[in-house]
Image (spheres, rainbow, N blue to C red):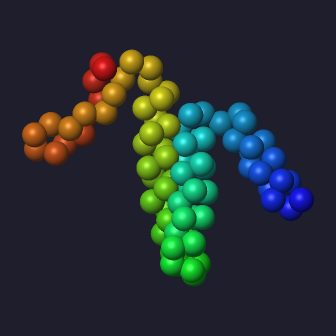
Amino acid sequence: MKKAIALVLIGLSVASCTQTEKGAGIGAATGAIIGGAVTGNVRGAAVGAAIGGVGGALIGHVTDQPGQCYYRDRYGRRYIDNC
């Protein structure tokens, strides 16, 4: 029952956010769960949350811009252009 309530609260907390914020929240939560499960300690969960949050924010940011994609040039620099 506690898990169901937690999932409902998480779902409601991201209901009115932008895609970038939703991506960051979902990425951070997923990263924390995976990091905690793999390492078995809080430090791993914190690192996982940080990495997941950044990754989720980047993915969410792209979805805010329909028809735009991230690309890398031959020097490794990222840029956004039409898909």
Q: Among all residues in the image, which is located at the extreme right?
A: 1
Q: Among all residues in the image, which is located at the extreme left?
A: 74
Horizontal and vertical percent for residue 44? 51, 75
- Residue positioned 30% across, 19% down in the render: 82
Q: Is residue 63 left or right of residue 19?
A: left
Rendering quarter of residue 65 = top left
Q: Can residue 11 be seen here?
A: yes
- Please, is residue 75 above or below residue 31 in the view? above
- Please, is residue 64 above or below residue 8 in the view? above
Q: Is residue 5 left or right of residue 72?
A: right
Name the foreground residue: 69 vs 35.
35
Image quadrant in which the C terminus is located: top left
Horizontal and vertical percent for residue 42? 59, 78
Q: Can residue 49 be seen here?
A: no
- Residue positioned 60% across, 64% down in the render: 33
Horizontal and vertical percent for residue 9? 80, 49
Q: Is residue 65 left or right of residue 36?
A: left
Horizontal and vertical percent for residue 55? 44, 50
- Residue positioned 78% across, 42% down in the render: 12
- Residue positioned 57% across, 72% down in the render: 37
Q: Is residue 70 left or right of residue 49?
A: left
Image quadrant in which the N terminus is located: bottom right
